[in-house]
Image: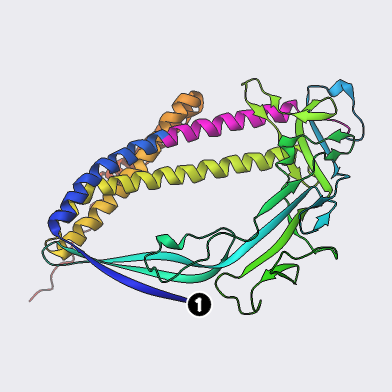
């Protein structure tokens, strides 16, 4: 269930012009900042790729069922089961022999979303309609209703039971102890069925696979609370790290950076490095896209005063806005390409030079091909036989 309220505000042409001029400064800062982001991202991607390539060539297979001193300090790849002898439990007697135990608490609360729509008026003014929509949702953190536009929607505030996570003190990886750094990477949580000894907190009742506080679990009301549990069970994992005695630590690469990986399930070292490289490329392209988008927004903010100036007649203002937006798009594409190219000249000059030479060669070949066709057409036209004379006119 949801409801909404709409607020209408007005802004004069002069006020819009002042805001757009101020926005030019912020647009310029965003535009310049995106160059820094793109440059940093290319460096990050190249360095990460180099680290992964180095690790791929230095990693060795090592036995997981015994501690072999010949692998001490080396970058090793192992596959085996993780387990613990500990039983994790909370204060409500929910207990399980598990690697991790997590209590997830949710409260049925009001949430607020906002949408705006603007309309230009003759004379350059602008009317803004802001719609605040309120939904009832299960949320795992307190939502501050004091900041809502509509003060009639009130949430209870603090939770009667807190979210919490318990982690086993010692986790075995066959003959090894799993380090705390690697243990943080094990997050394959699955929902847990409550044991018989589990006792609901005061005011709660057992419901499905957890606890519930409220009149009717099938018809939730604001302030109702539900609790369920999740756990990481013992199972196989794959590790790439430096062997340190009967445990592990990060491996120091030639660059001085550290490398340490864990993947749930049985995976080869090659598959782990391939997955890491794919993630590296995914992050790189996401940041490239973000850099381009930021440049486009920054350029549009810098061109904003021009469209506001012509908004005295909204039709002219819309045409100018569309034109400046298109121009900003083209300039953002070029700017992003230049930013990435500069970074590649810095981090990978040889590849960048080869790419530039290849691009110039392709342009030259295309130009020569069209020039050759033009010359051939000119020669054919020059040496073509003259057209036959027209037939004689019949005698009158």
Residue lying farthest left?
396
Q: Is residue 148 left or right of residue 125?
A: right
* Range drawn in magenta: 37-63
Q: Residues within 10 Å of mark 1 (few under 14, many from 20)?
A: few
Residue at 54% x, 59% y: name it.
142
**Residue named by callout 1:** 1
Q: Looking at the image, which residue is at 11% across and 61% down?
A: 312
What's the colour scheme?
rainbow
Residue 372 visible in rendering: no
Q: Nearer the viewer, residue 20 or 62?
A: 20
Q: Label 1: state its secondary structure.
A: loop
In the image, is 73 to the left or to the right of 9?
Answer: right
Q: Along the line of sight, which residue is nearer the eye, 359 or 7?
A: 7
Q: Is residue 46 magenta?
A: yes
Query: In the picture provided, is 14 more to the left or to the right than 2?
Result: left
In this view, 118 is above or below 26: below
Q: Position of residue 81 (x, y in %)?
A: 86, 44
């Amino acid at each position: 269930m949801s409801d909404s309220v709409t607020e209408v505000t007005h802004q004069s042409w002069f006020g819009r012009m002042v805001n757009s001029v101020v926005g030019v400064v912020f647009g310029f800062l965003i535009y310049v900042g995106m160059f820094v982001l793109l440059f940093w991202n290319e460096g990050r991607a190249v360095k990460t790729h180099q680290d992964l390539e180095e690790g791929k060539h230095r990693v060795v297979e090592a036995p997981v069922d015994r501690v072999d001193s010949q692998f001490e300090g080396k970058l090793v790849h192992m596959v085996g089961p993780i387990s613990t002898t500990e039983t994790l439990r909370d204060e409500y007697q929910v207990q399980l022999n598990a690697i991790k135990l997590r209590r997830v608490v949710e409260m049925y609360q009001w949430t607020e979303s906002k949408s705006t729509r603007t309309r230009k008026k003759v004379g350059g003014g602008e009317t803004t309609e802001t719609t605040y929509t309120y939904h009832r949702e299960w949320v795992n953190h307190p939502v501050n209703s004091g900041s809502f536009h509509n003060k009639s929607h009130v949430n209870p505030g603090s939770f009667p039971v807190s979210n919490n996570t318990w982690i086993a003190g010692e986790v075995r990886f066959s003959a090894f102890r799993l380090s705390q750094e690697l243990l943080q990477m094990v997050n394959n949580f699955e929902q847990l069925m409550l044991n018989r000894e589990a006792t609901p907190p005061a005011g709660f009742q057992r419901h499905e696979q957890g606890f519930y506080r409220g009149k009717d679990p099938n018809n939730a009301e604001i302030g109702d609370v539900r609790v369920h549990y999740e756990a990481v069970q013992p199972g196989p994992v794959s590790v790439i790290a430096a062997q340190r005695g009967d445990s592990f630590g990060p491996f120091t690469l030639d660059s001085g950076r550290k490398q340490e990986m864990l993947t749930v399930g049985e995976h080869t070292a090659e598959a782990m490095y391939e997955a890491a490289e794919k993630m590296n490329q995914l992050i790189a392209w996401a940041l490239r896209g973000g850099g381009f988008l930021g440049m486009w927004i920054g350029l549009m903010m810098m061109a904003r005063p021009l469209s506001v100036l012509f908004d005295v007649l909204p039709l002219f203002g819309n045409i100018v806005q569309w034109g400046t937006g298109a121009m900003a798009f083209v300039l953002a594409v070029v700017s992003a390409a230049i930013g990435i190219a500069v970074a590649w000249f810095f981090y990978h000059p040889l590849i960048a030079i080869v790419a530039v030479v290849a691009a110039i060669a392709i342009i030259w070949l295309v130009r020569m091909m069209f020039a050759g066709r033009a010359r051939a057409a000119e020669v054919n036209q020059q040496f073509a036989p003259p057209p036959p004379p027209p037939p004689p006119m019949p005698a009158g």
